[in-house]
Image: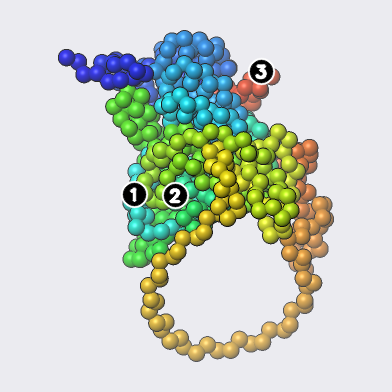
Amino acid sequence: MAQTFEMKGRFMAFSEKCRIGMIGAGNVAQRHARVLSGFADVEIVGVTDVVAPAAEALATTLGAPAFPDAAGLLSLEPDAVYVCVPPFAHGHAEEAVLASGAALFVEKPIGVDLTVPTALAADIARRGTLTAVGHHWRYLDVVRSAAELLADRPVRLVNGVWWDKVPPVAWWVRSDRSGGPVVEQAAHVVDLARALVGDVRAVYAAGTGTPPPVPDADVDAATAATLIFASGAVGTVSSTCVLGWKQRAGLEILAEGLALFVGEDELVVRDSTGQERRIPGDPDAARVAVDRAFVDAVRGIGDDIRVPYAEALETHRVTCAIAESARTGQVVTLAAPAASPAASPAASPTASPAAVPAASPAAVPAGSAAPAGSAAPAVYAGRPATPATPTLTQPASGASPATIASPASAASPASSPASALPPMPAMPPMPAMPPMPSMPPVAPMPSAPPAPQAPPAAPWAPAPAGSTAPPEPGRPATPPIPAPRTAASPASDAQSAPAPPIPATRTEASPASDAQGAPAAATNPSTGDGGSADE
Ligand SMILES: NC(=O)c1ccc[n+]([C@@H]2O[C@H](COP(=O)([O-])OP(=O)(O)OC[C@H]3O[C@@H](n4cnc5c(N)ncnc54)[C@H](O)[C@@H]3O)[C@@H](O)[C@H]2O)c1
């Protein structure tokens, strides 16, 4: 008798294929289609894209039909659907897939802000839909090795970086379409930090306020963020897109007596032996593994989905908090997800079975300060319809930090500054240090002539917009500090961009596609790479 497995509530023979539909036919969809086509137990049944030629091109390579919309594709009753659309286009496609009963694979990031993802997460939880999100770094062998090395050592410091070029997709440089570089791209290292170090409780970030030198760009050319983890570890994440190449992307992790760098291509380990070991990574294997794990789960023969939708939402809350903090100049705290296990540092880079809580009725827009003297911080549930004017505010100046609440935990009355930022765990005692060897006597320094005293600078006081600091002798004048960006003045950003514009390698085809996203370019002529948004 043929062996069977259960899929979508019916028992199927193992000889039956998993039938998959594709929504979006751009760069990353092409990659998934290539991988899935290599699986003997998968059949790609159809493709749709708002740009019909893109759908037709991919469908032709797969020998499958192209459809003008998701409804046509879903009429084939696929077992699972991949949603590979740009960040701004998430929502309707997922809703249609969920209503069809198919399993759902979504590319990261799951939205430009928290509005659509929070609603979708609630719907997914209600329906119990099988989901996965394309955080394929969690499938890197080097991430597993890093987790093993960190298993018995508390992490103290983290430094995540994504220093790269502007990817060749037109929507990427617009914050309302991509969410900005941290949400869109550095999400991989933030997700890795969550997997290896645990949940993040607070962020404080700054952006350049000026865009990269690309036409129509309004995203920050660079962002730097400070992160406080629930475990007490601290860290930074920085992102820039001003290079013409990928300089570095990954995560440095410092634990007691151990330094790691985890990248897509390698793990670098240095411990108390002082020896540096380089362990090569295999990103292509991880890109296959993320699809294989999803297909196995859909077929009911595997259980290795490491980032279901609810887990991706937790990472997305952190990247949105960084974007929000850079926009407002405020510290943003993140309430603990009610149903998620406590911070899971180093325990496993694999699935965190976070349940999805219901939306919080208590949420107020970001940047809302609590009334003076109030103990409760503002609770952040997503980007406000009208963005608050960014202010450069000292954290200590009395402005209450905003809180990005996990939906269910936001409903909890425990959202107070004290509960949002848990007390630091007690540190284990440090081993006694060996006595310092005695140093040879040091010759006294010749006394230097007294330096002219500059008047003390007012701490945190930015120079007035447009002002120019007097040049130091022998140094060129410092360029004026740009005025903080406001939603109403993108032109001032463009004017202050120092470098000449780099022509965009992709343009959006038509007003219709402008609203929906551009068709995929097979290859970026300027870089020779595949043109994917974050490869
Ligand atoms: N996990 C990874 O390694 C990885 C790699 C690359 C890209 N990505 C992510 O994948 C997403 C897409 O990136 P990309 O490089 O493929 O972009 P892309 O612009 O090349 O492709 C997106 C496609 O979606 C189509 N589209 C837009 N709205 C649609 C809608 N409502 N319905 C159907 N199709 C629609 C566009 O016409 C376009 O063909 C981004 O969020 C990106 O971050 C992830």
Q: Secondary structure at mark 1?
A: helix
Q: Nearer the viewer, residue 397 or 257?
A: 397
Q: Nearer the viewer, residue 242 or 484?
A: 484
Label 2 CA crowd tier, 10 Å (few <14, some 14–19, many 20+): some
Q: Residue furthest front?
A: 413
Q: How many numbered discs?
A: 3
Q: Which residue is mark 1?
A: 145
Task: Give the vertical position of 190 relative to 425 (above or below).
Answer: above
Looking at the image, tell me whether mark 1 or mark 2 is earlier in sequence order: 1
Amino acid beneath label 2: Ala
Q: Position of residue 308 (x, y in %)?
A: 43, 33
**CB under 8 Å between discs 1 and 2:** no
Residue at 21% of width from left, 19% of height from top?
3
**CB under 8 Å between discs 2 and 3:** no
Residue at 37% of width from left, 55% of height from top?
150
Q: Which residue is mark 2?
A: 343
Residue 208 in the figure: left or right of residue 157: right
Q: Secondary structure at mark 2?
A: loop
Task: Give the vertical position of 319 relative to 372 (above or below).
Answer: above
